[in-house]
Image (cartoon, rainbow, N blue to C red):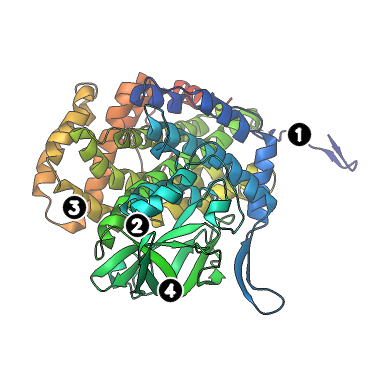
Amino acid sequence: MKNAGTHEVFNQPEPLVDYNLFETNRPLRDALKFNAPQLQVAQLQELGVTIGSAEMQAHARLANVHPPELHTHDRFGRRTDEVEFHPSYHILMAAAVGAGLHGTPWTGTSASPHVLRAAGFMLFTELEPSILCPVSMTYAATPALRGNAAVYADWGPKLGSLWYDPALALFKDKPGVTMGMGMTEKQGGSDVRANTTKAVRDGSDAWGERYAITGHKWFFSAPMCDAFLVLAQAPAGLSCFFLPRVLPDGTRNAIHIQRLKDKLGNKANASSEVEFHGASAWLVGEEGRGIPQILEMGTMTRLDCALGTSGLMRQALSIALNHAAQRKAFGKPLIEQPLMKNVLADLALESEASTALAIRLARAFDHQADEHERLMARLLTPVAKFWICKRGSHFAQEAMECLGGNGYVEEGGEGIMARIYREMPLNSIWEGAGNIMALDLLRGLRKGDAVAALAKELAPARGQHAALDRLADALPARIEAMASEAEARRLAQDVALAVQAALLAQTAPPAVADAFCASRLGGDWGNVFGTLGARTGFDSIIERAQPL
């Protein structure tokens, strides 16, 4: 291509577009075969085509370039408290809801609804993660809402609907609805016991005990959802409440949006600060039992943090591979350069291990009647959320470096990498940062026979790599002796690595499993990506990870 007669533009890669994200993701497909062998994947094939299209990528870009805008009042001075989104945001939301990534696992007929939904959630994250915030909260809030049978009877079917309707209207007049959450306050953050928002009894009606809520929420994401689960101090203690935007009589609830957060990333999603001025809400569950309610919901959203980061890893890796396959330097494609091979293979190992662990965790939610699966969900939720999300930011930085300066520019196809980099820290912070996850693991270890559960989980991979066997042998004593919170992060790391290695030993080719064990468990690795041993099967690892 000639450029104004001064030079010819060449050696620039074509963007990664118009491809099937599911069909080309062999690690994900193998994880599904292992965890849900009877799963029908036609829906995922269709979704993979849709979100890999140039059209949908354009909508993802526009939804981030044109962030939401808050309108607190109309031109006559009346409060409106509405957030306006670019049309592309609504197109993305309609696609995510239409794919059943929100409340459908609670109403669907699939034999593995949580695994199916998890795979779709990961794929959609590759396209645009910001809009999945209300999708994730709807998924998490739906089962908790059963704590109020009357509200659930009215709202449950619409929370599982495949129709997205952005209108701020009475739930009866909408084909589908979404839900958000409001937990943290200025003074407490993750310590929700420090919340000061008050709930005062205000009568009862068809939805049960009604309360007037007065106070604030410091992080109130997706304020245009149709309803929210919020925590407030009731006479018997911290309690969970159902708080709709529009009341049953058609009037708007007293939720005042103070401002939208100016965030590092997650630009397409509206995160807000709100005040409640005697807002009407209905008790969910028992008064004073808000903490157990929020922990149940947090388990689901923490799963989504692990799924989302895994999806972002996969997209960053795909972009890096696409670039390296086309870009030439020093006489040959980057992907043939030994140092670049090391980096790309190392990233591929990390991406596949994260996918394997996240899908394994989703499988546990499909089998909660099984004692082992129930305990593994309790243990692996904080472990996966902690480790996968901690690895995300380092992963994105290294993948961006594969593109050089083009990766740092927010323009064109490779500009997605900058968006991924800004997004990565969120999942590590949201729904409990690293220390909260480490503490949650310690609590989980006291809920059952964790040593026996982990031994059963690792048993199928025993004997396949000496480094894995050594770690598996050491974990029981470390778990039983765990008394210091200061060591909880290291334990979470090592449990994650052991389970990842065991899963790869059962689902991945030998080159992948051996390289992962040798590097992450055996010490044949440096402190940054791209430091795998010289005997690593670089070519086969990279070939397996290719997006095309």
Outermost residue toward the right in this view: 5
**Quadrant housing residue 479:** top left
Q: Position of residue 496 (x, y in %)?
A: 28, 40
Circles 3 and 2 in contact, beta carbons < 8 Å: no
Q: Is residue 421 above or below residue 477?
A: below
Query: Does 40 sit left or right of 367 as displayed?
Result: right
Mark 1: secondary structure: loop
Mark 4: secondary structure: strand
The tag on residue 432 is: 2
Circles 3 and 1 in contact, beta carbons < 8 Å: no
User: Which residue position holds label 3?
Assistant: 443
Whole-Å distance between the Cαs marked 1 and 2? 46 Å
The residue under the point 37% across, 56% down is: 431
Circles 4 and 3 in contact, beta carbons < 8 Å: no
Which mark lies nearer to you, 4 or 2?
4
Q: Residues within 10 Å of mark 1 (few under 14, many from 20)?
A: few
Of the numbered discs 3 and 1, the one sitting upstream in the chain is 1
Q: Amino acid at mark 2?
A: Gly
Q: Amino acid at mark 3?
A: Arg
User: Which residue position holds label 1?
Assistant: 10
In this view, the residue in front, 46 or 17, is 46
The residue under the point 67% across, 57% down is: 66
Mark 2: secondary structure: loop
Q: Is residue 418 above or below residue 278?
A: above
The residue under the point 55% across, 67% down is: 251
The tag on residue 216 is: 4
Q: Amino acid at mark 4?
A: His
